[in-house]
Image (spheres, rainbow, N blue to C red):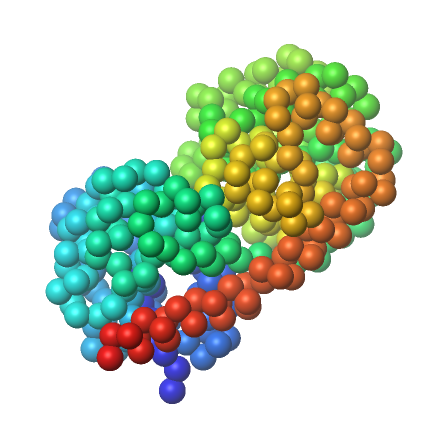
Amino acid sequence: MGLNLAVIAPFNVKCGVASYSRDLYDALVKLDVNVYIIKLPRFGIKTQEIIRNVAESIPIKEIDIIHIQHEYGLYQDKEADLYGILKRLGKPNITTMHAIGNYKIDSVVADYSDVVIVHNEFCKRLFAFPSVIIPHGCKLNETMPIDEAKKVFGVDSRIPVVGYCGFISEAKGLDTLIDAMVDVKNAGLLIGGGWHVGIDTNYIIRLKQKSFEVLQGRCQWLGYVPDERLKTVYSAMDFVCYPSRWATESGALLMALGYGKAVVANRLFPFVEKEKKGALVTFKGVKNLKRKIKRLLKDKDYRAKLEEGARNYCMENSWENVAKKHLDVYNHVLEKSK
């Protein structure tokens, strides 16, 4: 008889936490965990009534433990309402923090959670309360021949392609990548992604206009990339860049590693941790990024070494391994609660 788990998270929407929750759910089911999905609305104003309805929809007699997937925008300062109801339900609860840094909310989560899970050492240091590290899971994915993939987007196979794929906002730093590409004359830029809702934001429109002016025919925007097109998009990229200005973790970056791509990322603490493991290389500033791009385009052996490091990182942090670590935490909390 497997463990019975309720997971509170957004599902089946354009959202990184939703994608994470789906992959974790799939991996836990394979470990004989019975997962009850408690769907949290991703968009719109969260009222106390909505939060109460989410909490009260948990089949409390059927489950052993509750796992909350937390990101600040998901609950809109209604954490005290949610956790207050969950506490009265009498079941132990685990919280995964997908972002860290709001002390007021973090303290509420820490007070009410039996265990708080974070993704890396940086988050553990930033979170001012006890926590357990379980890395964000990765999945190795098959690719298609790069020439064939480039052809889909009308790109000559002889032209190297620098890529980005993920959500697009000012925090993602794509203007830095566009600036760096200006002097990389022999390469194209392929950008996949959009925002959670709608087609374009004002920021994305400004970025497109800038890229059309300074890269003149060398930049192609793909918009939001559905799951069935990810293989083609990543396969068309010689390597991938993530110039985020701020990050506690990046599911999009991990997906690039999962496709075995060499990755260059801004020198943020979570990415430096991966660089030390050989999974990627970091940069600092536009000039340094330009040099890193040129080296990756020129040095095939260097690129191949990073590709191998990417695959090794993904195997070490596969969803199967990550799910097993979650199961250890669940069992420990249940044993302690007895």
Q: Quarter-wise, where is residue 116 in the image?
A: bottom left
Instruction: Tell me where residue 126 appears, x and y as whole percent.
Output: 39, 42
Instruction: Tell me where residue 250 appears, x and y as whole percent.
Output: 52, 44
**Image quarter (top left, top right, bottom left or bottom right) of the C terminus:** bottom left
Q: Residue at the spot x=80%, y=50% of the render?
A: 145
Q: Residue at the spot x=15%, y=56% of the render?
A: 84
Q: Residue at the spot x=41%, y=76% of the render?
A: 33
- On the question of residue 141 being in view, the answer is no
Q: Nearer the viewer, residue 151 or 69?
A: 69
Compared to 69, does 105 lie above or below? Answer: above
Instruction: Tell me where residue 264 appears, x and y as whole percent.
Output: 66, 36
Instruction: Tell me where residue 186 appears, x and y as whole percent.
Output: 81, 23
Q: For the view shown, which residue lies furthest in the top direction? A: 213
Compared to 179, does 259 lie above or below? Answer: below
Compared to 155, does 254 lie above or below? Answer: below
Does residue 334 appear left or right of residue 252 in this picture? left
Compared to 195, does 149 lie above or below? Answer: below
Q: Residue at the spot x=74%, y=45% of the render?
A: 306
- On the question of residue 33 being in view, the answer is yes
Question: Total label count?
Answer: 0
Does residue 233 appear left or right of residue 194 in this picture? right
Q: Quarter-wise, where is residue 184 in the image?
A: top right
Q: Quarter-wise, where is residue 74 in the image?
A: top left
Does residue 197 appear left or right of residue 160 in this picture? left
**Image quarter (top left, top right, bottom left or bottom right) of the N terminus:** bottom left
